[in-house]
Amino acid sequence: MSVILVFLLVIAGFAGWWLSHQRLMAKPWLEQGMAGDFVGFDRSALPTAKIGLGVFLAVVGCLFSLFTSAYFMRMGLPDWQPLPLPRLLWLNTGVLVLSSVALQCAVIAARRGQTDMVRLGLATAGLTALAFLAGQLMAWRQLTEDGYLLASNPANSFFYLITAMHGLHILGGLIGLGRTSASAWNGARPQRLSLSVELCAMYWHFLLFVWLCIFAVLAGWAATFIDICRKLLT
Amino acid sequence: MVDVTPADAVPPAEVGEMELYHPHSWWTKYVFSQDAKVIAIQYSATATSIGLVALVLSWLMRLQLGFPGTFDFITPEAYYQFITMHGMIMVIYLLTALFLGGFGNYLIPLMVGARDMVFPYVNMLSYWIYLLAVLVLVSSFFAPGGPTGAGWTLYPPQAIMSGTPGGQDWGIILMLSSLILFIIGFTMGGLNYVVTVLQGRTRGMTLMRLPLTVWGIFTATVMALLAFPALFVACVMMLLDRALGTSFFMPAIVEMGEQLQHNGGSPILFQHLFWFFGHPEVYIVALPAFGIVSDLISTHARKNIFGYRMMVWAIIAIGALSFVVWAHHMYVSGMNPYFGFFFATTTLIIAVPTAIKVYNWVLTLWRGDIHLTIPMLFALAFIVTFVNGGLTGLFLGNVVVDVPLSDTMFVVAHFHMVMGVAPILVIFGAIYHWYPKVTGRLLDETLGRFHFWVTFIGAYLIFFPMHYLGLMGVPRRYAELTDMTIMTESAHHLNSFISIMAFIVGFAQIVFVFNLIWSIRHGREAGGNPWRATTLEWQTPQTPPAHGNFGKELPIVYRWAYDYSVPGAKEDFIPQNVPGAFAPSREPA
């Protein structure tokens, strides 16, 4: 359960930092009759939707940390037989990076108000994300053809489960991206469009980060890294 | 600390108005509504209905335990199904949904001075997914093989084996699917509750001016958002084990002389995931109760809450600590003694912030102008019950005491006192308190007092004797206790007595439900602020509050939520939106 505890520690650190800026030492019973003197303590200047997405990403992060925790706990048992990762995953990773880069370009274009470039960026991001999903399915097919079936051993089950969960999250993101694209083509207000593109980009970057972590865990590098840390500590 | 000087005149608020969705038809106004108040009522009604099902299930269990062998239709399989469904429904589909979905939806926007939740559409989806989860759960009663009988903790491997009711039928699949749906729905609602507290607060409503109800619900929601994913992961993995034959939790196992296809899974992994959710869940239910009871006590004792800052810090501390105690549910599963030591220590440390809260409630009552209204009665009953249940928790937190008691009725008595009866008492108190705001009428007083006394005394007569049964060694989870040497004749009498009390208390709840329905039309008119309370929900122009909660202008907050009996003020309460400074209230820093 160490991965999830580390993740929660990060969340707790962030929450503590935020709370420390909220006048938790105030004595509210002495502060009567004042309403306008608390500039900066009312609400954040960030758009509400961004904060909402931030909270949601914390929940998603929690979910994947738990999957990873379970993976490491199971991996510690003696009969663990890791499966060889298909080379195709490298290509998929590249495609997903491309998708994130395209969305970042769309964000920059949206800030400058270049609608054509926004549309181009959104379309590229959507197509590359679909390509990533197709690539993942092909990787699954390669593995099943080589006899690494879902139920044949726990390492395989974890591989399919975690990649499927990540894929489902990308799929959900594509719905949001589709709605943003629709508003980009239908001529939404530039400010509003800019916000939705930024939200998409935030989600995409986060899922890219999650994928890189998962990839490291599934390939076994994360375990090596933890081993090295453990040796350094002891 | 910021030094601030009092100022009477404040420029008009510049709070950004949100775009409210305005319903156009009866359907969008009352059924597919995006108004948090309607969603709150939908949540509460659904949770209460499924809760009544769980109440009946507890009666059926008590029939079997109190009068063994008398009722043929209660087979051991059926008994296990009753236990499982009773536990799961009460903990998740009733308590969690009612506190967060019901009270959270109704009170957060009103108390922080917002027009509605920040994402109303997602909020609506949250309810409908919750309803779907409840329907899936109910459908398992009608599925072939009936609902699952794996116990509310659903431990593998037994949960998905043929010896357990529903293990190889539909029961467990429907249960896991229902939980997954519940978690998805809850996450949608939870995002709303958290972000509304962060971003929906009206002008002047700083975090340290929030009523403790909002603090409790807010912290509990943050915890739930971080804890429910663990249950989600556990459910998904077990569903795959059951449906697709993977081996996440299933070890190599022989059943009826036949080797199953599973191989190499770890049942302990499930326990870790389950309790990583399961322990925070206790506080997800308790923290809203703590918050609500603070407000009830302060309002009905006409006195500011004692140690507001400590109350807030204690809520945060309990929330954080509750994530590092989960393995105290697994002492019996065996663990490294150092881990046992660690988890016993953290478990006992949680008692410190909790005790601070209890002291503060008692000190709030001290020399207060206590009105023994029905909400106050329930609040007082909560304090007593929570202390009671909490003390047995200190026993069970120690490994050496827990191991012999773990499988006895003592544990049943403990957790029913601390997370069954105590939060339910707060829910009742809160319903009596806020019902006038929801409907404009008070609940009937006589029926209410009847309900309180029967519930309070009855609950003690049910669960107090159970402690003794547990200390005698009477095991829990057994459908038949007749032929055991520990079951002396007096123990049997005690069991029958508990069962009879359970029926009486259950009957009082039906009176309560009748009161809820009857008073909508026939209750005494309440007016806008019957309890003369300070918080914003009582200051709305209409009662029940209209769509958008507050009239044309959002209220501006000038003070904290506990200005009761302020010396120098005309009335014994000053609502949060009243400007002007009076002499500082009595509490010393």
Image (tube, coloured by chain):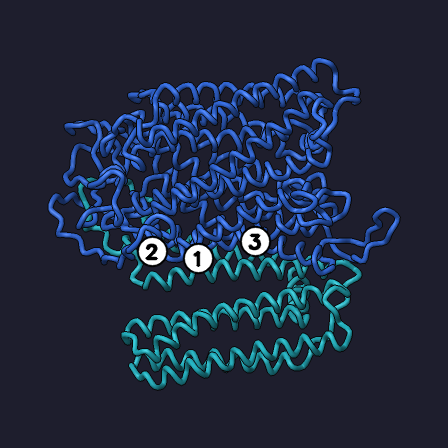
Count residues near mark 1 (Cα–Cα under 10 Å), then give few for <14, some for 14-19, many for 20+.
Answer: few
Q: Earlier in the sequence, mark 2 or mark 3?
A: 2
Q: CA distance from mark 2 to mark 3?
A: 24 Å
- From the rendered image, report the letter of the chain displayed in cyan: A
Q: Nearer the viewer, mark 1 or mark 3?
A: 3
Chain under numbered label 2 = B
Residue tagged 1 = A14
Determine whether, in the image, residue A17 is placed left or right of residue A140. left
**Which residue occupies 65% across, 18% down?**
B496
Let me know if residue B378 appears in the view: yes
Amino acid carrying label 1: it is Phe
Amino acid carrying label 2: it is Val
Amino acid carrying label 3: it is Ile
What colour do you see for chain B?
A: blue
Q: CA distance from mark 1 to mark 3?
A: 28 Å
Determine whether, in the image, residue B579 is placed left or right of residue B112. left
Q: How many marks?
A: 3
Q: CA distance from mark 2 to mark 1?
A: 22 Å
Q: Is the Cβ of the residue at disc 2 closer than 8 Å to that at disc 1?
A: no
Count residues near mark 2 (Cα–Cα under 10 Å), then give few for <14, some for 14-19, many for 20+.
Answer: many
Determine whether, in the image, residue B179 is placed left or right of residue B157. left
Residue tagged 3 = B180
Describe the element under mark 1 as helix, strand or loop.
helix
